[in-house]
Image: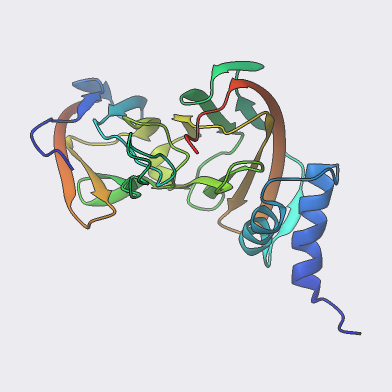
């Protein structure tokens, strides 16, 4: 029996802890591997991640998403990368943001496509390798991935 | 990428030293995710903006790797801390390698 590496375990642990359910996901393996890759080498922690998403998205073609992470954004301590995953989309990785201290705030917003009701998972990494995770469910009335 | 349409950028023309300003950008792009079919049932190939970069006086402020789930006409809002006069440079890169760029100057007072 091959033991999985501690890195993989942390990655998978993060995913399972965050996803909180094992119901059939459209792209569970992809979402899981992307999250494990992003998490590798980082210690999961809880911190203030705000995910702004409508509770119900009438149109899955364009759903506003805003992310904010509490951080001093100094050279010594700043959020460096943020991964946004839509677990049930055909391609789960939505975007990856890179922040520098010059951004002043670990905060960004965009508009995304959602294929169906699901959870959006946000992972944030700091320059010192600390990892924060959070997630938020959203109901989608009409899916927006065109497939 | 339709180079004729200029991206829309909103940021203040002036700020105080050390102030954190908000920047909003919008660019025209269909962001074809490769899953749609035309009326003949033929799949429309994927063609998206996959990368956005914002620099100030040559230094990276904020950047983003976009995938197919970013909605058409990508909107990106973020912040920048300004300490001196200078120029923001924005670039959007298409899957086909072409790049669209734009610049905005800002005056920073003490």
Quadrant where the N terminus of chain A is found in the figure: bottom right
Q: Residue at x 82, y 51 (%)?
A: A16
Drawn side of residue B23 relative to residue A26, left or right: left
Drawn side of residue B91 relative to residue A10, left or right: left
The outermost residue toward the left is B4
Pinpoint residue B22: horizontal percent, then vertical percent. 36, 24
The outermost residue toward the front is B40
Q: Nearer the viewer, residue A116 or A82?
A: A116
Pinpoint residue A18: horizontal percent, then vertical percent. 79, 44
Pinpoint residue B99: horizontal percent, then vertical percent. 18, 50
* Any part of residue B105 in sight: yes
Pinpoint residue A37: horizontal percent, then vertical percent. 63, 64
The outermost residue toward the bottom is A1
Drawn side of residue A58 relative to residue B51, left or right: right
Q: Residue at x 44, y 47 (%)?
A: B67
Say which quarter of the image contains residue B73. top left
Q: How is the image coloured?
A: rainbow
Q: Nearer the viewer, residue A62 or A26?
A: A26
Say which quarter of the image contains residue A122. top right
Q: Residue at x 67, y 28 (%)?
A: A117
Q: Residue at x 25, y 31 (%)?
A: B27
The image shows residue A41, relative to residue A113, as above or below, that is: below
Numbered disc total:
0
The image shows residue B109, relative to residue A4, as above or below, that is: above
Q: Nearer the viewer, residue A104 or B24?
A: B24
The image shows residue A12, relative to residue A75, as above or below, that is: below
Drawn side of residue B85 relative to residue A129, left or right: left
* Any part of residue A78 in sight: no
């Amino acid at each position: 029996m091959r033991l999985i590496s501690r890195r993989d375990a942390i990655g998978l642990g993060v995913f399972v802890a965050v996803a909180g359910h094992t119901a059939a996901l459209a792209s569970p393996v992809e979402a899981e591997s992307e999250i494990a890759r992003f998490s590798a080498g980082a210690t999961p922690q809880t911190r203030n991640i705000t995910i702004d998403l409508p509770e119900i998205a009438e149109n899955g073609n364009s759903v506003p998403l805003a992310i904010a992470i509490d951080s001093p954004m100094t050279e010594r301590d700043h959020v460096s990368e943020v991964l946004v995953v839509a677990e049930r989309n055909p391609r789960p990785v939505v975007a990856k943001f890179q922040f520098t201290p010059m951004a002043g705030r670990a905060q960004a917003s965009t508009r995304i496509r959602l294929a169906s009701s699901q959870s959006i998972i946000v992972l944030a990494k700091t320059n010192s390798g600390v990892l924060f995770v959070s997630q938020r469910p959203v109901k989608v009335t009409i899916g927006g991935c065109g497939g | 990428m339709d180079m004729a349409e200029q991206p829309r950028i909103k940021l203040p023309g002036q700020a105080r030293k050390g102030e954190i300003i908000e920047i909003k950008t919008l660019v025209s792009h269909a962001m074809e995710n490769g899953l749609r079919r035309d009326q003949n049932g033929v799949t429309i190939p994927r063609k998206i903006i996959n990368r956005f970069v914002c620099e100030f006086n040559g230094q990276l402020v904020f950047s983003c790797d976009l995938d197919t789930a970013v909605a058409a006409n990508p909107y990106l809002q973020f912040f920048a801390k300004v300490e001196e006069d200078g120029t923001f440079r924005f670039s959007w890169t298409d899957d086909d390698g072409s790049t669209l760029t734009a610049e905005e100057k800002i005056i920073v007072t003490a």
